[in-house]
């Protein structure tokens, strides 16, 4: 395996690359690199290489359906494309397909920024949680509306600091607050906007731990709660009754050297029921949670009924 591919795998696993879209893009870039460095002499051997790498990439972050969907689409395309063609042509077509995916992701991102910015009223106070490049993109798009943002710090890895710095550098009035102060600042908020790692068949949101708490508090104060998410963040496995795996991160992130008898649980994500969300901001528009399943399966080309 080429060193550049190993680095991408390590960066995804260590959360150096974070955000579902960025993880998906990095995984596709790894496939492109594999194509360029591959020494496979036949389409069958090349398919085996790509499938093996896809499995390794998917295992780096269990709760990332956008990456899984991108990898599955790549493998399916290659399986069909590799029949009856030369290895040179197969590699060429495969790389072109992956580059087209990256281009489409960039186009969809701009649409989400546009739809999300329209939702934010002038002078609005917005609360956000963790770091989502989608959410920061929306907020920067709405900068001219004189908005104010409260960013939760998001322990234990403090991704909220990334959000706060990015928005402050963009000239947006931004205040970093501790996670435990969510309720205090919700009283001042006009809306909450967060990203998404995964969305289930019933429209539930899986996102950074603490999101569910924020949603419950927003509901209590009758504050609108939105999640910005591409349709490709739909978790197909949830249609068949499986639950999205909640990744447990290292206890050392919480406490480097805890007392001997203290147990530490460090879940990376939690689940927010669809009833706490006003809508998802997607590349096709602002949609109610129950509609996510229908639109996502259509985009991903999933046929539920035969």
Image (cartoon, grey):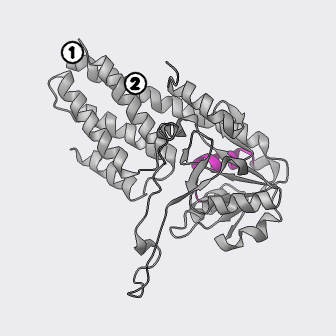
> Residue 25 occupies which quadrant of the picture?
top left
Circle number at residue 86? 1
Instruction: Indicate whether residue 141 is drawn in magenta.
Output: yes
**68 left or right of 175 in image:** left
Q: Say if residue 178 shows up in the picture.
A: no
Say which of 228 and 210 sits in front. Answer: 210
> Residue 10 occupies which quadrant of the picture?
bottom left
Instruction: Indicate whether residue 274 is drawn in magenta.
Output: no
Say which of 234 and 185 sits in front. Answer: 234
Q: On the image, numbered disc 2 is attached to which residue?
A: 97
Q: Secondary structure at mark 2?
A: helix
Q: Position of residue 303 (x, y in %)?
A: 50, 22
Rendered residue at 55%/28% (across/down) = 297
Q: Position of residue 89 (x, y in %)?
A: 26, 17
Rendered residue at 27%/49% (across/down) = 6
Q: Find the distance from the CA under tag 2 to the CA under tag 1.
A: 17 Å
Q: Secondary structure at mark 1?
A: loop
**289 left or right of 78 in image:** right
Boundaries of the magenta span: 130-142
């Amino acid at each position: 395996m080429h060193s550049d591919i190993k680095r991408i795998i390590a960066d995804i696993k260590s959360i150096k690359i974070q955000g579902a879209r960025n993880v998906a893009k990095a995984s596709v870039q790894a496939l492109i690199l594999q194509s360029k460095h591959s020494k496979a002499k036949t389409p069958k051997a090349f398919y085996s290489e790509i499938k093996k790498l896809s499995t390794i990439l998917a295992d780096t972050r269990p709760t990332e359906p956008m990456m899984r969907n991108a990898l599955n689409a790549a493998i399916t395309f290659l399986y069909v494309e590799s029949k009856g063609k030369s290895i040179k042509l197969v590699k060429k077509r495969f790389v072109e397909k992956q580059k087209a995916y990256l281009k489409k992701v960039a186009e969809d991102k701009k649409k989400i920024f546009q739809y999300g910015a329209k939702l934010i009223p002038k002078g609005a106070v917005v609360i956000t949680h963790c770091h989502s490049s989608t959410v920061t993109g929306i907020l920067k798009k709405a900068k001219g509306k004189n908005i104010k943002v409260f960013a939760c710090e998001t322990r234990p890895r403090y991704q909220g600091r990334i959000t706060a710095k990015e928005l402050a550098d963009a000239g947006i009035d931004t205040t970093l607050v501790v996670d435990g102060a969510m309720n205090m600042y919700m009283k001042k908020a006009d809306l909450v906007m967060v990203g998404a790692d995964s969305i289930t068949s019933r429209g539930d949101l899986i996102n950074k731990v603490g999101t569910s708490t924020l949603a419950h508090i927003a509901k209590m104060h009758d504050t609108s709660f939105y999640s910005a998410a591409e349709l490709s963040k739909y978790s197909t496995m949830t249609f068949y009754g499986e639950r999205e795996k909640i990744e447990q991160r290292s206890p050392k992130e919480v406490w480097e050297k805890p007392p001997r008898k203290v147990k530490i649980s460090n879940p990376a994500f939690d689940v927010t029921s669809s009833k706490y969300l006003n809508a998802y901001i997607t590349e096709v528009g602002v949609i109610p949670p129950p509609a996510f399943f229908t639109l996502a399966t259509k985009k991903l080309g999933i046929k539920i009924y035969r």
